Image (cartoon, coloured by chain):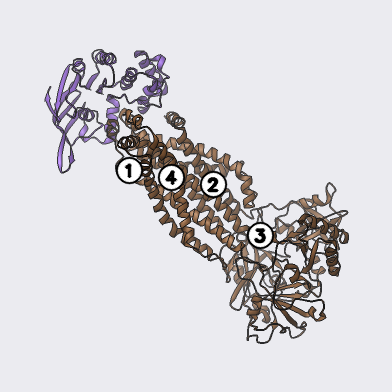
Amino acid sequence: MLLQLKNIFKWVNSGGQRIFLLKDINLTVEEGEFISVMGPSGSGKSTLLNVIGMLDNFDEGEYHFLDESVHTLKEKHRANLYKEYIGFVFQSYHLLDDLTVYENLEMPLLYKKYRSSERKAMVADMLDRFNMVGKKDLFPAQLSGGQQQLVGVARALIAGPKLILADEPTGNLNSQQSEEIMQLFKTLNQEDGVTIIQVTHSEMNAAYGSRIINLLDGRKIGD
Amino acid sequence: MIKNYFKIAWRNLLKNKGYSIINVGGLALGMAVTLIIGLWIHDELTYNSYYKNRDKIAQVFQSQTFNGQTGTGPAIPLPLEPALRDGYADNFEHIMMSSWTMDSYIKYKESSIARPGNYMQPIAPEFLNLEIVKGEKDGLREINSIMLAESTAEALFGNEDPIGKIVKLSNQHDLMVTSVYKDIPFNNAFNDTDFIIPWDNYVAQWEWIRNSLDNWGNNSFQLFVQIADNTTFEKVTDAIIDIKKNADEEVAEFNPRIFLLPMEDWHLRSNFENGKQVGGRIKYVWLFAIIGIFVLLLACINFMNLSTARSEKRAKEVGIRKSIGSQKGQLVNQFLSESFLVVFFAFVVAVAIVLLSLNGFNELARKEISFPWQNGNFWAISLVFIVFTALLAGSYPALYLSSFRPVEVLKGTFQTGKYSGLPRKILVVLQFTVSVAFIIGTFIVMQQINYAKNRPVGYNKEGLIQIPTFAAEFSGKTDLMRSEFIKSGAAIEMATSSSPTTRIWSNRSGFTWEGKPEGFQEDLAWTEVSAEYAKTLNLKIVEGRDFSRDYASDSLGVLINETAKRYLGMENPVGKLLKDSDEEDPGPPLKIIGVVQDMIAQSPYEPVKQGVYVYDREDNFSYYNLRLNPNKSASQNIAIIERVFKEHFPDIPFQYDFVDEEYGEKFAAEERIGSLSGIFTALAILISCLGLFGLTSFVAEQRTKEIGVRKVLGATVFNVWNMLSKDFLKLVIISCFIAVPIAYYVMNGWLQEYPYRVILKWWIFALAMLGAMGITILTVSFQAIRAARQNPVKSLRTE
């Protein structure tokens, strides 16, 4: 078991009323799974992903990640935990505009205190693997959307995470670019054994995964 | 990691060039001001650092009370010296009598120069740490010797060896040069002492000094001491405070108190008010220290405001970094590194600015400050200064930016919230409060100067020159010279006087007159003049008549000024007598022949002192005063006068001053303060406006979409401009209302020092407020109008 959510609730108070963003979510994810989270807009997909990614808090329930109880951890420990095991891929890539491709890839390693020689080797590896050696000195704005997302995935992968969380990774891409990214995810999942949880609107993308979770109004309505 | 921080910071600087220029430029300006002020303060505080024994050196001061008014000064009577030497020798390491620093003519062969110098007792070379370049250390042993400063020796002798040569002083006394000493550096007392002659020579030269040897009432000399190692200034003062009072019954009624003023107080704390030490230049040190801190603060506020205003742009970066694993501390470090980089750049630019402006500043402030390249302490302090500024300017943005929550900023639901702009607004208010207060302060200083300048002086100071006549040769030639000058056509009138027109050198007491109240201790300004003095100065006679050569009895006549008329309590002064109250050897009584209009001879900020103008019977004059011929140009007149002067006094260097320029010197201190604070105010406003400019451009950018929507819905350029400007204008108005009472309080206190002062009018404050608002509107409008004129389609399409 990689992670387990037990009776997770998350709400906001608005005008005296409690609005539930997540309602009684129970979910167990094993290592090596490829899960697609689906549901209409506002159903809580992204919130769920952020909770899993420990970027967001929840109000009630238990969250176990590997052997740690996330709900009892302090912010700093939690950050160390996700830094270690989780990589993020965003819909709008979220690359740092001021940094080159090379530096964007290097950044997570800096935060993990790898030595300079190690960083060089790891970034070179990743550039090689994604066929981006020639683009390493370009800035994000000089790349196409697909290429930017490729860098985004590479950045998520570089520190060797166990879990990749992707929030509509192909939302800003055309169909051909989407397919490339989804193929990449599939390969990562099957050949490298990386666990992937993605949020998507597209049935086609969901089909790449091994399991689909459906959300509606913060509730899990299908698995 | 650090490298990475700096790399990002550097790219950020390059990418946002406008922002960087505002940030680095504003900060650099602020730092340059602070640096210059710091150098100035250092210079002021290290005054007299040339003297090794400065902790032990003091000047003997005296305070006396006349009619309840206590006056304090360095002038002491001669018998004080033997009294100290005989009775209190244990307290002192050295005791040294000195004359005032006086201009004298020194002549060697054909070259003749006028230089300031002192008569001092032989201990002077040791007392003043003189560095002997040539000749003997003990140069004042022989009564007819003279020690010269290096620069003076050079001017007089050129390449010749001066030692053993004979020079002529005031064209009269032969003195032998015994040694040459290095000029005392500029930033020290006695820096203008260009020669030293033995004190005994001074005593031998003048009968009036010999007559004063046992006279406790003639306060005309200076006395310096170095106290013994085992005592303190306070202890010595306690011991000697009543020495004069106890020595002489006649002067005891003025309650004379003798005390020591330590060398470290000479420059900064030498003002006395009613016998109490009340500071002095130190107040300007404080004033400028405060200005420096505020200007730096303004620049730092810019930095903080611009950084946080850009937060929304940086928010995404913070979010990504956090989601990738950055901890808050690391982000804080990152933003602080950026701030260090900016501050460091600003410092480099500031140093460049200081280097470029130091000459001008020196000229303005009358300083000889050089940039302390060699000084390790300076660089150490600069480093601390950089770190301090970086922390001051960078800590708030660093903490603010690094506390963003990644989910919110990445989801795009990030909002800065209703009150997130509040700190920024408070900082802007603070900035403009300082700026407005500076504007008001500068206004008032300038007004006060103008007010005093426009005060009628009582005589016509334009077209009037004075020529110093400090040599014995001038005696007996007054009438000849007067007719020569007038005949030459360069002057239309001439008169002599015992002190310059713009000074009072002598005060007298010891008179009786009809109706003098019992126990009245009079104190009269005393000037001896020749018959045409009032005529030369265009001084108006308001009662009685002027001196006239037709009446021989006028040689015992006296003119009094209007204040003296009131002071002496005379309804009809003309014809009354001022009698000498000395019982043993009274001088002849003086008959008041007329009353002249008050003229300002001392401070233009103070009431005119009661004064008498006595007919100069004994050629005691020190100056020729000449009314130039108005039909010729000044330079023509001067050329002719010089020629005439040289015909009669070929051995005396021709010197002259325009009286109006001399008078203008009285404003020099205030004008320096005025122009310096004017410049600093201008810079403070510039820095504040830079910040405001930057802030407006960010607000305009932030609200691009809103402006687009509003324009689509029909808003005009004016509406948008109004909307953007209003917010800032509100802040500035708040600032004005905070600044006005503060400025009023401070400036009112400052003005209290001047008995003749401008009245604070409400319109000064109104004008300053309007000025600040006008500047704000101008600054804001530039960006606001640009934003308002953008095509809404463009700004909306990006969404």
Name the element at disc 3: helix
The reply to whether dot 3 and dot 4 touch (C-beta < 8 Å) is no
Residue B664's disc is: 3
Q: Quadrant of residue B125?
A: bottom right
Q: Which residue is mark 2?
A: B33
Please report whichever mark, 3 or 4, sits nearer to the chain's N-terminal start: 4
Please report whichever mark, 1 or 4, sits nearer to the chain's N-terminal start: 4
The reply to whether dot 1 and dot 3 touch (C-beta < 8 Å) is no
Q: Which residue is mark 4?
A: B301
In the image, residue B124 above or below residue A38: below
Foreground: disc 3 or disc 4: 3
- Residue A169 placed where, x, y %? 26, 21
Q: Residues within 10 Å of mark 1 (few under 14, many from 20)?
A: few
Q: Amino acid at mark 1?
A: Ser
Residue A32's disc is: none
Q: Which residue is mark 1?
A: B420
Which color has been applied to chain B in this rendered view?
Answer: brown
Q: Amino acid at mark 3?
A: Gly
In the image, residue A160 above or below residue B672: above
Q: Quadrant of residue A78?
A: top left
Q: Name which residue lies at 64% across and 45% down.
A: B359
Query: Which chain is disc 3 placed on?
Result: B
Please report whichever mark, 2 or 4, sits nearer to the chain's N-terminal start: 2
In this rendered view, identify the residue nearer to me: A67 or A119: A119
Name the element at disc 1: loop
Q: Quadrant of the C terminus of chain A?
A: top left
Q: Amino acid at mark 4?
A: Ile
Which color has been applied to chain A in this rendered view?
Answer: purple
